[in-house]
Amino acid sequence: MLIFIPARLTLLSLPKTGTTALEVALSDRADIAFRSAPEIKHLNLRQYRRNIRPLLTPFGAPEFETVATMRDPIDWLRSWYRFRTRDALIGHANSTVQVSFEQFIEAWLRPMEERPAYARIGRQSDFLRNGHGHVAITHLFRYEAMDALLKFLGQRLGSPVTLESKNVSPRTVTDLSPALEARLREALAAEFEVWESARVE
C-alpha cells in the first residue's frame, strides 16, 4: 500500500495484480509506504478504512481516494497457481508443483474449509469491499488496462509512471477442459461483474 498525501490518493495492493512492479516504480514518490511483509503490504479496503485512514485525518480535506487493480478472475487464479509452483515452495502444503491446474481449480471450487492449503485463496472482490459488503474503491482499474492506470497515476502525481516486470511467476500449463471452465465461470460470475465494471481508460 502506497499513500500520496498531496495527491490525496491511496494505492491498495491486491495480490497478483502487478502491485510489486507498481511499488518499485512509485515507492520513492510515496509519502507513506507499507511494503515487504504481506500482512502490511496487502491491507484490504476494510483494514485500510479501519486502521489507516483515521491516521490521515490531520491532513484535512479533501478526502483521500483509493485506487486498485483487479485481474480477469480466471487469469488471477492462474497467476496464483503459477506462483505456487516456484521452487521455494517445494515441500510446503501450499505448493502446486505436484498438482495440475485442473486439480487446483477443482479444489478451489470446494467450500473454503474443505480446500487443501494450496487452493485456499479467496476472491478479489473480498479485498475491495467495505464494511457493508460493497465494492467501494474510488478508482478500480482492470489489470489488463495497466496503461490506463499508469496514465491516471501520472496525471495525479504530476509526472509519468513506467513499470518494469517484477515478481514474475514460472511458466506452466494452465489449460482447462471446457466443462470445468464453464463450472468455474459460473462460480466466478459475480467476480466477472466487478471486473467488467472496472476502468479501462
Image (cartoon, rainbow, N blue to C red):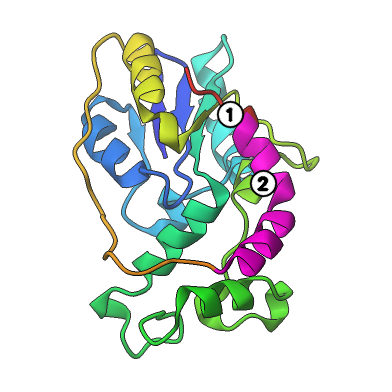
Q: Position of residue 127 (x, y in %)?
A: 60, 47
Give residue 136's position: percent from left, percent from top. Answer: 68, 31
Look at label 1 and name its amino acid.
Answer: Ala
Q: Nearer the viewer, residue 173 or 178?
A: 178
Query: What is the residue that sits farthest to the bottom in this orientation?
Result: 91
Q: Which mark is residue 83?
A: none
| Residue 137 sits in quarter | top right
Quarter of the image for residue 65 reads top right
Residue 174 magenta-highlighted: no
- Residue 144 visible from this viewpoint: yes
Q: Is residue 190 above or below residue 69?
A: below
* Structural distance between the alpha carbons of marks 2 and 1: 11 Å
- Local secondary structure at mark 2: helix
Q: Is residue 170 above or below residue 2?
A: below
- Residue 158, image x and y in percent? 29, 8
Q: Toward the viewer: 58 or 44? A: 44
Question: Which residue matches tag 2?
Answer: 191
Q: Amino acid at mark 2?
A: Glu
Q: Main secondary structure of the magenta part?
A: helix
Range shown magenta:
177-196
Left or right of 11 on screen, residue 50? right
Q: Is residue 7 above or below residue 21?
A: above
Which residue matches tag 1? 198
**Dot 1 lies on which element?**
loop
